[in-house]
Amino acid sequence: MASILKLPDIWRVIRELDLASIRRDAEGRFRLVILSEKDADAEAVVSLLSGGPAHPWLEVRAPSDLATGREEDGMTITAVLAITDQPALTPAGDTAIQRLARAGVPVVTVVHGSGRPVDAVARAGETMRTVVPALDDAALAPIAAALVGAVPLSLRLALARQLPPLRDAVFDLLIDETAKANATYAFTTAVAEAVPILDVPLNLADILVLTKNQLLMGYKIALGAGKSGRARDVIGEVVGVVGGGFLFRQAARQLVGLIPVAGLIPKVAIAYTGTWAIGRAVVVWATQGRRVSPATLRRLSRDAAGRGRAFARGLLSARSSRSASAK
């Protein structure tokens, strides 16, 4: 199996991608505006997002400032968090949000002091809306999830790198998206592998593609957590953290797909769970500075196994539904 998957071969594929672009995204600047009628509310959110002294890239503004502000605001503001204690925004707040929305600026409205699900429904001009009982520590997770889900992909790593309290939300989304992407890729090729002549070549290609995606995910997590250094060195550290042996075993298990059709669900589930476990292990190293043990890696894989199988069955069910409707 070592002849199938060699790290130098993987590196040749990885370095063809624009790793410099990924680093530029992670090290890029942003202008995140906290929009609020009340200074105390804005300061509470700035404190939550900064996790310490106020980050200089977080800018507190009143709605009236942006309702009739400079035209260039729409081009320089990266995203807006609108903070309110009322479901309906003030006229100035609504005007500011509509103006920013027309300029393509993502706007996330946070309604605090509400527990009504209807208040979480996004209104015109809002990219996303969330409700929290109060602007305290418990509000960080829903605010972070809404903000990270609303901003462009290219901004997520910069948010994580500069604002540590947002890292959990960024990494959770990155790991889930990569695990699902790998599982979907494995599903697509597994269907093609039902044709015997295509079977072995596609399985070997799977190994390279899935492992490449996992290492790129690890590289992004490392950058988002503030790691520096040459891309090759950082990716080498990721391999060291996960353990080359785990990567090789994970790749070898993909060959379960050599069992036509019967191996489809296990193969897709393996692609999901292996990717998820690797992502969680890299997060522990990148954010806490410690490496997980092989036993912990196996436990992480088991923890994700149910979700992996459920996702695989969902893909199979969707394919069956499409096939039935096409008849």
Image (cartoon, rainbow, N blue to C red):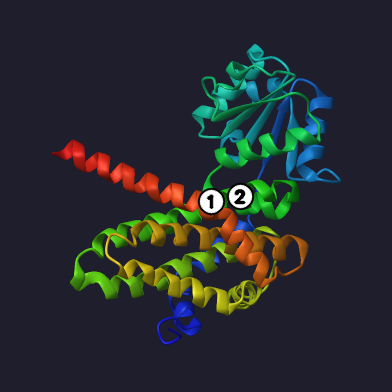
Circle on res. 232: none
- Image quadrant assignment for residue 135: top right
Q: Residue at x 63, y 27 (%)?
A: 130
**Does residue 284 appear to the left or right of 94 in the view shown?**
right
Q: Is residue 133 left or right of residue 259?
A: right
**Tally of numbered discs:** 2
**What x and y, as percent, mark residue 18?**
48, 67
Label ID, residue 172? 2
| Image quadrant assignment for residue 78 | top right
In this orientation, does residue 16 appear?
A: no
Residue pictured at 73% horizontal, 45% vertical:
57
Quadrant into which the N terminus falls: bottom left
Q: Quadrant of the C terminus?
A: top left
As shown in the figure, which amino acid type bears the numbered disc 1? Asp
Q: Amino acid at mark 2?
A: Asp
Determine whether, in the image, residue 184 is placed left or right of residue 41.
left
Q: Are marks 1 and 2 in contact (CB under 8 Å)?
A: yes
- Secondary structure of the residue carrying tag 2 is helix
Q: What is the crowding at mark 1: few (fewer than 14 residues within 10 Å), some, or many (at least 20)?
A: some
The Cα atoms of the two marked residues, 1 and 2, are separated by: 6 Å
Residue 127: x and y in percent read 54, 30
Q: Secondary structure at mark 1?
A: helix
In the image, 309 versus 119, the foreground residue is 309
Which residue, as the protein is rendered here, is positioned at the far bottom? 3
Residue 316, compared with residue 187, is above or below; it is: above
Image coordinates of residue 214 in percent, x first then y, are 52, 65
Q: Residue at x 73, y 37 (%)?
A: 140
Q: Which residue is mark 1?
A: 176
Q: Residues within 10 Å of mark 2 (few under 14, many from 20)?
A: some
| x and y percentages locating residue 8 in the rendered image | 49, 84
